[in-house]
Image (tube, rainbow, N blue to C red):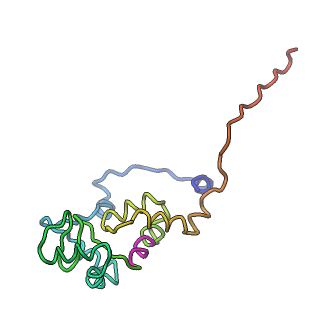
Amino acid sequence: MHARWFLYLERFTFVIKHKAGKTKKVANTLSQKPNFLTNGKPDLIHTLATELISLESLRDQYEGDKDFGEIWEKCLRGLHVGDYHAHQGYLFKRSWLCIPHSSLQELLIQELHAGRLAAHRGHDHTIELLLERFFWARMHQDIDSFVRQWGTCQRAKGQAQNTGLYVPLPIPKTFGRT
């Protein structure tokens, strides 16, 4: 893939110049990661409300969830359950929003792996993006399964494998000597 990009870009004449941080104020602001903790409490709710349509439905799904149901009940009663706590009707593990088993998990993986700005950057990058905000049991396995089944990623990967023993090149014969 990189070779194709290189072949495409080498057709153009351009110069890459460094701009000091002071001169690119808008880019610096846009590239900064938001702070998800406010007064020690997660402030994800306000950020996610603009990103996800079905966020409100999470509140009803915690109770019957096989992974979070028991933890949710204990947190509602004010009991301490490891790194988990309830805040504004949502369950958090540290600063990560807990996502119960639902189609929202696959939607999040799809958006962060194959969304408009995601660029299919692979399994590890998708995990990194999800772990900035979300948590659910078996997240790594779900992402691995999704990436393996995603057609675009499989077509972009080369099928040739360099397997087997390396064979040394033959020693060239010298010309003009006998």
Residue 11 image offset from top left, x and y in percent? 62, 55
| Majority secondary structure of magenta residues | helix
Q: Nearer the viewer, residue 35 or 154?
A: 154
Quarter that holds the C terminus? top right
Residue 12 image offset from top left, x and y in percent? 58, 55
Quarter occupied by residue 77: bottom left
Q: Is residue 75 left or right of residue 3?
A: left
Vertical relation: 60 (above or below) 130:
below
Vertical relation: 75 (above or below) 127:
below
Q: Is residue 171 left or right of residue 63?
A: right
Q: Residue at x 27, y 54 (%)?
A: 22
The number of numbered discs placed on residues in the rendered structure image is 0
Residue 88 image offset from top left, x and y in percent? 18, 78
Q: Is-magenta flag for residue 105?
A: yes
Q: Is residue 30 left or right of residue 113?
A: left
Quarter occupied by residue 59: bottom left
Quarter that holds the N terminus? bottom right
Vertical relation: 70 (above or below) 57:
above
Give the residues drawn in magenta, as a range.
104-110
Q: Is residue 109 left or right of residue 150?
A: left
Q: Is-magenta flag for residue 107?
A: yes
Residue 28 image offset from top left, x and y in percent? 30, 59
Q: Nearer the viewer, residue 57 or 81?
A: 81
Quarter occupied by residue 103: bottom left
Residue closest to the far top:
178
Q: Residue at x 34, y 83 (%)?
A: 53
